[in-house]
Image: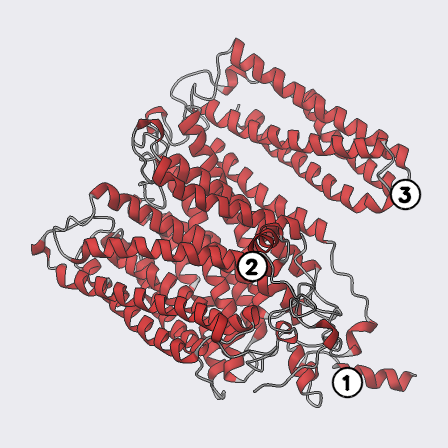
Amino acid sequence: MATQIPFDQAHVPEGTGDQTRPRLWLEVLHEWVTTVDHKKIGMMYIGYALFFLVVAGFEALLMRIQLAVPNNSFVSPEVFNGLFTMHGTTMVFFVGMPILFGFGNYLIPLMIGARDMAFPRLNAFSFWISAFGGILLYYSYIGGSGLYGAGSAPDVGWFAYAPLTAKVFSPGHSTDYWTLSLLLTGIGTIGTALNIVATIISMRCPGMKMSRLPLLPWLYLVTSGLTFVAVGPLTAAQIMLMLDRYLGSHFFDTQAGGSAVLWMHFFWIFGHPEVYILVLPAFAFANEIIPVFSRKAIFGYPAMVAASVGIGFVSLSVWAHHMFTVGLGAAENTFFVLATMAISVPTGIKIFNWLATLWGGKIQFTSSMMFAIAFLFQFLIAGLTGIMLSVAPFDWQLGNSYFVVAHFHYVLVGAILFMLFSAFYYWYPKMTGRMLSEKLGKWHFWLFLIGFHLTFDFMHVPGLLGMPRRIYTYEADRGWMIWNMIVSSGAVVQAVATLLFVYNMIWSYFKGPVAGPDPWDAWTLEWATPSPPPSYNFAETPEVSSRRPLWDLKHPDDPDGDYEIGPSHRQRAKQKEETA
Amino acid sequence: MSDVAVAPSGADMAWNPPARGIVGMVCLILAEASIFIIFIVAYIFYIGKSLNGPTPKDVLSLPIFTSICLLSSSLTVHAAVSALRRGQQRLCSLWLAATVLLGGIFLAGTAHEWYDLIYNHGLTIGTNLFGTTFYSLVGLHASHVVVGLIMLTLALWFSLRGQMRHHHSEKLEVLSLYWHFVDAVWVVVFLVVYVLGR
């Protein structure tokens, strides 16, 4: 099927050697709990995130059932408040971040030809403290109200505006569970981001200059840099909130002269870069997957790197577009409108480069590629509604309405989740050694696409008709019913498609066709290892001389290095011969 | 996978990527700096907004001696690293001990200042916005001093037992980077709290 890369027979994958006795499950468990291997930690991150994806998806379903018809009493208002808070918090901190860090953990050392991350034990620590944070958040369902009564989950919304979070308005401990779990996860996030940067800078194999680094590690570098400057403010704000709630300080206490708007600033200084922390890894997947299935090298590598770094910087100065309705004043509004519009320029460059990569390519419509192409279209639409909302007067009209909800779900689901599915179809063979079923994959794609568009295209309409977000029900004469019905039915279709995907992953693990080391005839170093890779990754440290080392290996007559700026290695070799 | 080595061209140039410890510490400093910036912004934002006393003018005095101690400890820790690089272990221990001593004096100064504020002036974290922002910002810095002192004391312990050798100098340098950061933050905190805020 693909070019076979010769690999040393002495280094067959583990477990196929002289092990006769099947291992006890306790031994397997012990191995996973104590592991510092970046591949195992990466897979634990992914598994943990998939679990929470199902949990938070279930919460979304409950909300959609409640909103499907007017005057519904499927859940109470209190439960509804808990549901949207937990859905948002879980999806951002316990699905989005861990799944992206999981892929990063797994792929980055393989792609740069390293044996492991720079700090393997810090890596394990970061994972376990993040995992503990997620469990702590969900423990609030049991212990949330502490001694005051029965348990309850946090219900202050995922951005937890002051002064609602003050002790007077949120008695009990439910808000503390929210604060503490984000604080802990923040520590894990900074640890992993630090690890990723140190790995990419210091662990590259010989010859892999920054100009030859694959685009996935490049974008993870930008994401990690953003993580430092974004998660820091969140951590600081959470410490302040804890001091307010426990030691009686007055940061956000308006009674003592404190400012509620200050919390909004601090939260969104984290919150908006966070969107780019989540979307840049999705871009990173697209940068690897689209060229391989177009059978062309990526178009405009330097422009892609520059655009990503540009997005990183500009994303730090757009946070207050979440706060237009506060009334910041004309000068501030103008600045944030312009900054927000400016960020669409580097983003547009990226879309242009992906299209140019597809142009004239020999496109292979695998499930992975189909999700990637849907990502391109949907990300464009999400960006367009983003530009609409960046205009302050338009935002005054539609702020806090379902139009906003539809916009950011278009980014989070239509762009990020679609690209994540694409990444699963692409790298699952590397992680497990088995291909995912293409037939089920196509069903998954079409069902999910239909469900997605039913839900999130039509969700814009009730927003335009004035339906505010976070309401638990509405009256029948508002004219919102038919739209909500369509939105809810789309959610059910998406749930079915996701179940199909989960089934595909389980079925293919046992019954899928054997993948071999390089099923896609790809060009980056991870495909030079057996599938799944042995714990040491590479028996010998690889050496590279271009951006696509496996292309060079498969086409020695036409290596990529010949097209690099500066003397190619062939010319250098020639010079060497002449001097010798 | 023995011949993934794709082309020999990379071999003829030296391959020395930066040390991972230094890169990791720079990243940590970046993340810590963003936490401090938020606390400093909150302090500046709330200057003069307290609804009741005491105000900074009434109760704060310039901690000049302890500040000099903390800042000079940056020099001594640098001297310790250079001594270890040259292989002078005993000198390294001496400079480390001086660093721990100077850091300890600073911490004692902060403790004395807080005792005075709490018992003589009645200023606590809940008194007013000044108390809230002062104790959280200075306290955040002091907690970083405590962490640094614990690690420096550990390094001193290893050094005294003769277990710190020349090849550990890079690790000691990583620790010294953290200590320089803690000192640099103090310069900003000093200017904001004791100069600008008074």
Q: Residues within 10 Å of mark 3 (few under 14, many from 20)?
A: few
The answer to whether A293 appears left or right of B175 in the picture is left
Q: Are marks 3 and 2 on the same chain?
A: no
Q: Is residue A125 above or below residue A45?
A: above
The answer to whether A37 appears left or right of A155 in the picture is right
- Secondary structure type for disc 2: helix
Looking at numbered disc 3 in the image, what kind of residue is underneath it? Arg
Q: Look at mark 2 in the image and give the residue it sits on.
A: A42
Q: Look at mark 3 in the image and give the residue it sits on.
A: B86
Q: Residue at horizontal 48%, vertical 16%? A: B123
Quarter of the image with the N terminus of chain A is: bottom right
* x then y, percent, for residue A205: 72, 67
* x then y, percent, for residue A219: 55, 64
Q: Residues within 10 Å of mark 1 (few under 14, many from 20)?
A: some
Which residue in the rendered view is the most extreme toward the bottom?
A557
* x then y, percent, for residue A200: 65, 61
Q: Look at mark 1 in the image and give the residue it sits on.
A: A570
Q: Residue at horizontal 46%, vertical 28%? A: B47
**How much space separates mark 3 and mark 2, taking CA atoms?**
41 Å
Earlier sequence position, callout 2 versus callout 1? 2
Q: Are marks 3 and 1 in contact (CB under 8 Å)?
A: no
The answer to whether A355 appears left or right of A33 in the picture is left
- Secondary structure type for disc 3: loop
In front here: A7 or A483? A7
Q: Is residue B184 above or below residue A322?
A: above
**How much space separates mark 2 and mark 1, taking CA atoms?**
38 Å
Label 1 chain ID? A
Q: Quadrant of residue A365?
A: bottom left
